[in-house]
Image (cartoon, rainbow, N blue to C red):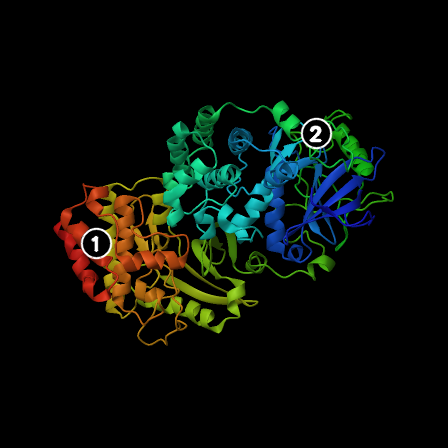
Amino acid sequence: MGVMGTMHQRAGHFPGYTIRETWDSPCHYEWYLATEDSASKSWCIIQALSRELCHTVELRLYYQDACRAEAHVRVDGVLPIQEIGQSRTHGVYVVYPYRFPYLRVGEVAAEVARAHRKMTPCFCASVLLDAVRILDEASRQGLCHFGVLPHHILISRDGDVYVTGFIESAMRRRFHFDTELNEKFDAPEIRRHESVGVESDVYALGALLYQGITNAFQPDEWEPRWMGMMDVFDRAGIPGDSLLGMLQFFQRTLAERPSQRYGTYGALAQALEHVISELGSYVPCEVRADFLSGMFDDYPPAVPCEYRSDVISLITGDFPTISGELSSGEYSTLNRESIERMSSRLGESSGRTPGSSPGRATSGCMGMEDTLTSPSFDAPETRILHRSSGSFRTINPSLRADLCASPLEILARSRYQILDQLGSGGTGTVYKVLDTTLSEILALKVLRPELVADSAWLQRFKRELKITRDLEHANILQAYHLEQLEGLYFFTMRYIDGRNLSELLHEGPLSLMMSLRILPQVAQALIAAHAHGVVHRDLKPANIMIENDSFHPYLMDFGIASAPDSQMLTIAGQGIGTPSYMAPEQSRGEPITILADVYSFGVMCYECFTQTLPFTGATAVAIYTAQQSGIFQPILSLNPRVPAGVARTIEACLSPRAFDRPANMGAVLESFMRA
């Protein structure tokens, strides 16, 4: 179970609990085995952000929101959250009841080998099938994983399967935390920090099954080992009449492109059921329990606990309204007994029976106010309460002084009111805001705080405003004002009610007529930019905003563009941009011309017409190698409806040698006009 350290007790870290063991924890979190400071002395598991991360308000707020999302889910295979709280030393923490000893899927193979037993493919597939069904039910209740790792799937002493790690996956999606594991368990889109979905879990579960059957990591589609999978299965003892079915299953689950994998948990479950029927039969829980008997730790002793339908949450606002105010800078101090007494007292005034749950407010009650009444009695254990509303006004000033101000906190003191987050990219995060001075809805882009210290990045960011301000074109999204507040750099621009082209492509195939309508307008925007001597250098679908009503495209994000009066900001030998869309000469860090944009435009057109990229790979080096080969599937073989002249021009744009491409975007646009 990964327990480490000697028995010790440390009070005060988590009010109401005594820490018994410190568990072997990843660098971003701290895990503890503890007992409740109550008559029952029940065992529980506590997870908290590491003490380094909990001092960053943005991380803490996102972590507590992820905890709240999991707390509202009721799925048999997901451990119920017992409590969400906050302490001075660890910030937000979450408490799970300890119910049983368990083995992580990543540990099962080692334990089986140590016991001199052999785990069958049907055993592995049956465990993962149960995990898929749990993930499916959780997603139906709004809890998504999209980042399954071997230690997230647990097998209990009774052979039951549980899925954990929803909170960690949410944090990974937002902040790109590393996993301290071999990245082979991550889907290619996770490794590239691209958008993830059900297909990412499909890949991870396929990788786990592959390892369970072959005792080796799965090959990537671009590796030579991909072509030898059938031989690997044959050596692993898969029956000959099942080899083809196994090969097709793994080619589908481990495909490089998410669109080629199973698109739903239900489809994956059906495929696993077919695999199990090919290899034998489903292995039920009691058989698993018998097979794994003797492999579980007996410490700590399991304490039976009833399933709790309520969550005692100290930060979610799931308490009734409490009148009165605290003096500035004070906290409420409540223990479990005082919460119950207060809830009972409030229940009488709100029409709730005294015996009802203290952890939930009835529909007639409002959420917790920003201020709470401090009880008149002394509480032996203190708990810090504040509302999880995104408001920083409720954080104690003495604690707040130790925390780094987040971009959202700084913007809260500006003229701009944050309404929504629109997206995040390599150079910054874009928000939908209300300009309270002009009563106007705008888009606001913030430079990533960690980049401000880099003078080259800061210079590039400032140039983005100047470049787009000088480019007056109907298909170019212009910037307005650059501002600096407390070290935070941001600028405003016109708000477009729409989605970027990458999001549209992810939702489904773009019709040929829509592609032929959008792409020429993007070409016209590039012609205007090139006429001013500006090379975009990061042309990709994510930088094309499409208005919802008119489908009018806007070219945006000139953050790494080069202008004739600017110095070369590229470090020698290091390209700037997005690998899949970068021209080969740009990847090499060489001086570039407008022909780099011609290449990127060709890649984008190829993707719009065929729903796939011409060159792919698991790493930037692999993509560059594929680009250099110049080998890709002809557009007409994938989509015969594309006009032949347009297809020839786009394929010419993809030439690895710049002088073999069309001379400029005008020549590319001409082929569209003739279509």
Quadrant in the picture for residue 485: bottom right
Say the numbered circle drawn on residue 651.
1
Q: Amino acid at mark 1?
A: Glu
Image location of residue 403, percent across then percent down: 66, 60
On the rendered structure, is 670 left or right of 491? left
**Comparing marks 2 and 1, which lies closer to the viewer?**
1
Q: Earlier in the sequence, mark 2 or mark 1?
A: 2
Which residue sits furthest left? 674
Quadrant in the picture for residue 530: bottom left
Pointer 2 residue: 308
Dot 2 lies on which element? loop
Dot 1 lies on which element? helix
Say the numbered circle drawn on residue 36.
none
Q: Are marks 2 and 1 in contact (CB under 8 Å)?
A: no
* Residue 497 visible at all: no
Of residues 64 and 187, the one nearer the viewer is 187
Q: Residues within 10 Å of mark 1 (few under 14, many from 20)?
A: many
On the rendered structure, is 654 left or right of 239? left
Alpha-carbon span between mark 2 and mark 1: 61 Å
Q: Amino acid at mark 2?
A: Arg
- Which residue is depicted at the point 65% across and 27% down? 289
On the rendered structure, is 9 left or right of 487? right
Q: Is residue 188 above or below residue 81?
A: below
Image location of residue 565, percent across then percent down: 33, 77
Of residues 427 and 641, the one nearer the viewer is 641
Q: Is residue 314 above or below residue 562?
A: above
**Quadrant including the N terminus:** top right
Of residues 120 and 438, the one nearer the viewer is 120
* Residue 192 visible at all: yes
Image location of residue 387, percent across then percent down: 66, 45
- Which residue is depicted at the point 40% across and 58% down? 620
